[in-house]
Each structure stands twice: as structure tokens, then as C-alpha cells.
Image (cartoon, rainbow, N blue to C red):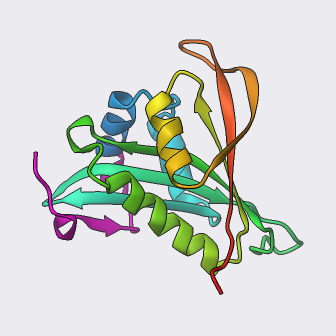
Amino acid sequence: MLIDQSDILIMKEIKRKDIEQILRIAKECKLAGWSENDYLSELERKESFMAAAKVDKSIIGFIVARFNLSGQNDEFNSSEADLLNLGVLKNFQKKGIGRVLLESFLLEARNLDIRTIWLEVRKSNLNARQFYFRNQFIEIQERKNFYTNPSEDAVIMKLEIIDNV
């Protein structure tokens, strides 16, 4: 399917009704087994970042991340965030949609003075690892048996955000 980037709408106002489509994408992409309740709880979290890519009325990709809070009033004064899930429907992969979703998160991270982004990815998920590598993430270490169903090691990756002055 040919798609023009101008046809993609990035929405940061994820609604309860959108979770069904997000679950379908997560399943197709074999992401970590989050339940509907996991995604719904993420909608309620102050430190959560959720965005979806839409073409027409269909969600074709999504990203979930969390800014680490610190301080007495749960303020965003930490310099780190965790990228928790990023998925794009297979028919729309390798068309720049994942990059657009990642960039929307990184823009928000920069606005909050986040300096380090962390993530875990299945060791066998070479496409995802290459995607993150192309987007300046580096592999730090492995975490044994991090994933279940099936059991698998995770590769921990990080991105240091450097301001271009």
C-alpha cells in the first residue's frame, strides 16, 4: 500500500474506544502482552505519553512511553523516560510511520528536558533493533528471560538526547 506522509495524522488524545485497535496492532506485532486494562490504566497516568498514527479513521500504529517522575509533587524533574511499546501494522511498516511516532515522543521528551530514553526489545526482534539503531539508540546489555510467552531475553537500549545548538 502506497501512503503519503501527509495522509498520516498523529493523535495524542487516545480514547478508551481506541484501545481495541491498539490491542490488535500489539498482537499483530507480537509486543509484550499488555491487557486492555494495562492500556486503559496508562491513559490515566500523568507521566504517560500515548500517541497513535491514523490514516482515514483507522489507527495503523501507536507508541506508549512513560516519563520518570521524581520529587515530592510528582513533577517531571527526572531526565529519563521509558519507551514501553511501539507498533505499526505490518501493511504499513517500513513507510516511516514508526519514525513519525518516535519523533512525536522525542519532541515531547525534549520539551520536558528528558536526556535519556530507555527501552527493552526482544533479542530475536531484529527489525525493531535495527529500527532503533537507525534512530540513534545503542544496545547496552541483555536481560535474561525478561519476556514470557515465549520466554526470551531482552536487549536493553538507550538514546541520549543531545540538543543541536
Nearer-the-camera pick, 15 or 116: 116
Q: Is residue 13 above or below residue 131?
A: below
Q: Is residue 72 left or right of residue 160?
A: right
Is residue 37 visible from the viewing direction of this image? no
Q: Residue 82: x and y, percent?
A: 66, 52
State which quarter of the image contains the C terminus: bottom right
Residues drawn in magenta: 1-19
Q: Is residue 62 left or right of residue 2?
A: right
Q: At x 45% / y 68%, what residue is drawn? A: 104
Q: Residue 106: x and y, percent?
A: 55, 67
Q: Is residue 113 above or below residue 127?
A: below
Q: Residue furthest top?
A: 150
Q: At x 80% / y 74%, what residue is drawn? A: 77
Residue 116 picture quarter: bottom right
Nearer-the-camera pick, 13 or 123: 123
Q: Is residue 13 above or below residue 1?
A: below
- Badge count: 0
Q: Is residue 56 above or below residue 107?
A: above
Q: Is residue 135 left or right of residue 68?
A: left
Q: Residue furthest bottom?
A: 165
State which quarter of the image contains the N terminus: top left
Q: Residue 132: x and y, percent?
A: 53, 46
Q: Is residue 142 left or right of residue 97?
A: right
Q: Residue 68 lies in magenta, yes or no?
A: no
Is residue 45 visible from the viewing direction of this image? yes
Q: At x 39% / y 35%, what residue is drawn? A: 26
